[in-house]
Amino acid sequence: MKGRVVVTTVVLMAGTAVEAVRAETFNLEPVQVVGSSVHPSQAVRSQVEESFNAGRSASYVDGSVIQNLNPVNKGDALRYNAVGLINQPGGGDRFGGGTKIRTFGDWGAAESIDGLPAFKSAGEEGGGYSNTIIPSIAVDRIGVLRGGRAVQYGDGTDGGVVETTIKSGRSYTDHQAVSLDVSTAREALTQGEVADHGDAWDYYAAGSWLQGEYDGDPENLDRQVVLGGLGKVGWNLGPGTRAEFLGIVDRSSPDIVRNGNVEEITVNSEVGAATVDHKYAEGRSVRAGMLVTNTRSTWDARGRDRSVDNRILFADHYLTAPLTDGLRYDGSIGVEYKQTDYLRDRTWDNSFTDVSVKSANAVTIDDNLVLSAGLRHTWFENDIVYDGAAQPDNLADDSVWSYELGASYSVFEKTRLRGSFASGFNRFFEKYGNFGTDALNTEGAGDDIVESRTYEVGVNQGWAGGFLDMALYTTEQDGVPRRNDGAIESVTVDQSGLEVELFQQIGKDLTLSAGYMRVLELETTRADGSKVNGNIFWDGQSTSVPENQFSLRADYRLTETVNLWGAGYYSTGYEAVDADGDVTERDGFVRLDLGAGWAVTDSWVLRARVENLLDERDFGQTVKGAPVNDEGKLGRVFWLGTDITF
């Protein structure tokens, strides 16, 4: 045997929360992601998912780092700590943070909570913090799962999935904690959590309240209030049966400044889920559940009223069994029903239905070589209503096949190779409204399902106190919508890149981790075979491609109770190539945050942080050679905070 099979990655992690006796501080340490503590009814499912994903790439960030780096906007903290996420020009500040993973022919990846089916939401617009739906105090970890993920997660998985794991009451005993933060940007953030468990039950609940009184600093924002809450309950019906219930509510109300007027935007979000796992025999279990999400964004001053609601039912059977000595099979089969209701500005009232059957399988040989294969078939149905009138069926394809092949193998004890070929698909329902009525024009491609294919190879090389992980990928997205004379034409977007992650423990006090991403190629091909470079969605639009993205994190234990940390990001610049070959270059930027934590006692931590130490205000918006206009933009901000565990 050359190496035990594990999924190894960099996780920025704080001390364990078991028994909840210590407040969290920023800390870096490597972990082996083999699933968190699970109930016996969930063990088979965890084993199957671990084996199936052994050949895939993923980056994880622990919740303690999210809470210390940007406790309001999880997307901002995530992209500076996980490779694979593409930072667009101008979106590098504390308020932004998209979910684009590797690919440019979409507007962001779908999200998953606790491994449930992926979904999309209405999102936020206009200004202020985004990505507020889950209080940061409630986050156990967030993973950026890279490469097509349709077999497991379904729609919105062209380049990957963002998966958030929420804390569980199973890890806590009679726990109460509060976190308080204030900043020189006139912000106050209060978060709290309670958790407990018994033999047959456990619960976790958290709440968050942000009050930001900006008064025009930054110049586009007057104020923002965010109120959110979360509850997660587990019920052990028996030694082999567990039910879990999740509820999330969030209300974000930024008041933005437009042309001297204050305009109110309101975003309401709700998530509800229920699952039951049952282990009915050794190595055999089933799971069934439902997921409901509602998100609605209203901006009355501009006549905007937009919502995305999802209703998802799913069931899976899991099996793990030895086939012969040194040969083990792990697999699952399942079904899923998903309905997405999409309303836009009282003009579009659309419904999209997906029905899927799926199977994920892996064979492990000599506890080393893992071979995986997955298949999913999804049937589609559209119900399009425009201005109150039902529209004819415009689906280009009524169904698609999704697939995945993977392999991982340790050639030496600490050298593991991996490779995969995987697909994703994207409904891209945002074309309705964003592309006018082009999708209804029968002269065009109509509603074409975007399908992606990702080829990837990677290696993880470990050594005493650290490791290096590298991945080289190429992804083709076929069926990407592009506006063309009042109709939709489907184009193909090809992109490739390199991702590197590094971790090193230096002595017992200093820990470093770093990330690097380079987009090697972006090319768009129209249906007639002509090349239009980065001009993907419509004439005159060209996608800005980051040249190099670097990130670095450091944690230094000054004493047993005092730690110093830093997190930095450097973009060398952006390049946008239009259909005619003209190139627009934008400047790069550097962002650096420094912080310190003092554990006054085991249950009381004081924190200080300097956000954007170098006072960056442009974040790659400025075209090279043009003067930088940073008037009215928010720069350096100082924070003070405390965490108290009762």
Image (spheres, helix red, strand yellow):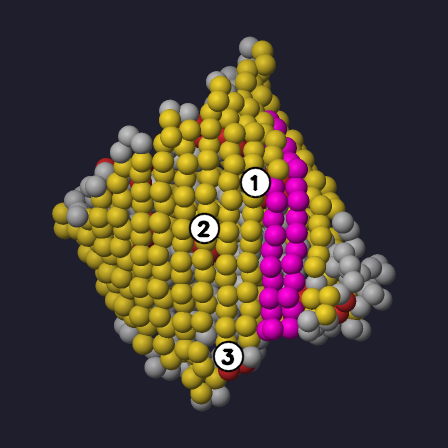
Amino acid residing under circle 2: Gly
Q: Position of residue 64 (x, y in %)?
A: 33, 49
**For the magenta stretch, what is the residue range?**
336-362
Predominant secondary structure in magenta?
strand
Q: Which residue sits at x=45%, y=50%?
A: 272
Q: Earlier in the sequence, mark 2 or mark 1?
A: 2
Which label was assigned to residue 314?
A: 1
The residue that appears at 71% across and 56% down in the rendered structure is: 382
> Which residue bears the numbered disc 3?
300
Instruction: Please tell me which residue lies in front, 102 or 255.
Output: 255
Q: Secondary structure at mark 3?
A: helix
User: Does residue 325 lie above or below 249 as drawn?
Assistant: above
Q: Residues within 10 Å of mark 3 (few under 14, many from 20)?
A: few
Between the C-alphas of marks 1 and 3, the distance is 37 Å
Residue 634: assigned label: none
* Residue 354 among magenta residues: yes
Q: How many marks?
A: 3
At horizontal 56% and vertical 33% (from top left) the residue drawn is 316
Q: Residue furthest bottom?
A: 260
The answer to whether residue 97 is above or below residue 173 is below
Give the CA separation, mark 2 to mark 1.
Answer: 14 Å
**Residue 250 % position (x, y):** 40, 61
Q: Report helix, strand or loop for mark 2.
A: strand
Of residues 364 and 381, which is closer to you in this image?
Answer: 381
Q: Which residue is mark 2?
A: 272
